[in-house]
Image (spheres, rainbow, N blue to C red):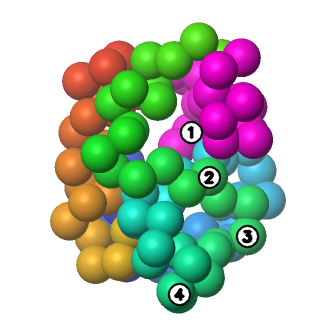
């Protein structure tokens, strides 16, 4: 399950539906995990240990580093990882930075 909306998890099928709208999907697994297990289409891979810094970057630097538009604090964001614990940490980090 994937973590979203303050502890609410979403299934992969629910994520596919969410991605039809303007949701930003951030995969917080390590790069080697993405290389080994594959990337979920249209997700941004930002390892958990980089997330706080990434979400505070200048948007131009973010685009240069992650090849994606930086999410706004008002954007709908879903975090995912392998088992759910890192995505919950990511949600807490983002909330503490003012993401709603």
What's the CA distance linking mark 4 and mark 3? 13 Å
Quadrant containing the C terminus is top left
- For the residues carrying marks 1 and 2, which lies nearer the camera in this image? 2
Please state if 18 lies on the left or on the right of 98 as rendered: right
Label 2 residue SS: strand
Give the residue displayed 44% in from the left and 18% down from the top. Answer: 56
Instruction: Depth check: give the residue in front, 85 or 53.
Output: 53
Q: Quadrant of residue 75?
A: top right
Label 4 SS = helix
Mark closest to the chain's N terminus, 2 or 4: 4
Image x and y of residue 52, in percent: 33, 30
Is residue 4 visible to the viewer in this orientation of the structure?
Answer: no
Badge number at residue 76:
1
Q: Which residues are magenta?
A: 60-78
Q: Name the foreground residue: 17 vs 54.
A: 54
Residue 64, x across and y down, in percent: 72, 30
* Residue 61 belongs to the span the image colors magenta: yes
Residue 37 numbered tag: 4
User: Percent x, y for residue 43?
Assistant: 65, 59
Q: Which mark is residue 13?
A: none
Quadrant placement of the N terminus = bottom left
> Circle 1: is it few (<14), some (14-19), or many (20+) Cα within 10 Å?
some
Q: Which residue is mark 3?
A: 41
49 or 1: nearer the eye? 49
Are there few (<14), some (14-19), or many (20+) residues within 10 Å of tag 2? some
Q: Which residue is mark 2?
A: 44
In the structure shown, which secondary structural element does the residue marked by tag 3 occupy? loop
């Amino acid at each position: 399950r994937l973590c979203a909306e303050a502890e609410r998890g979403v299934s992969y099928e629910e994520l596919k539906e969410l991605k039809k709208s303007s949701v930003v999907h951030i995969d917080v697994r390590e790069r080697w995990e993405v290389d080994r297990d594959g990337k979920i289409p249209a997700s941004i891979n930002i390892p958990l240990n980089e997330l706080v810094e990434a979400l505070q970057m200048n948007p131009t630097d973010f685009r240069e580093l992650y090849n994606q538009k930086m999410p706004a604090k008002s954007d709908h964001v879903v975090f995912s990882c392998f088992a759910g614990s890192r995505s919950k940490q990511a949600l807490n980090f983002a909330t503490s930075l003012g993401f709603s």
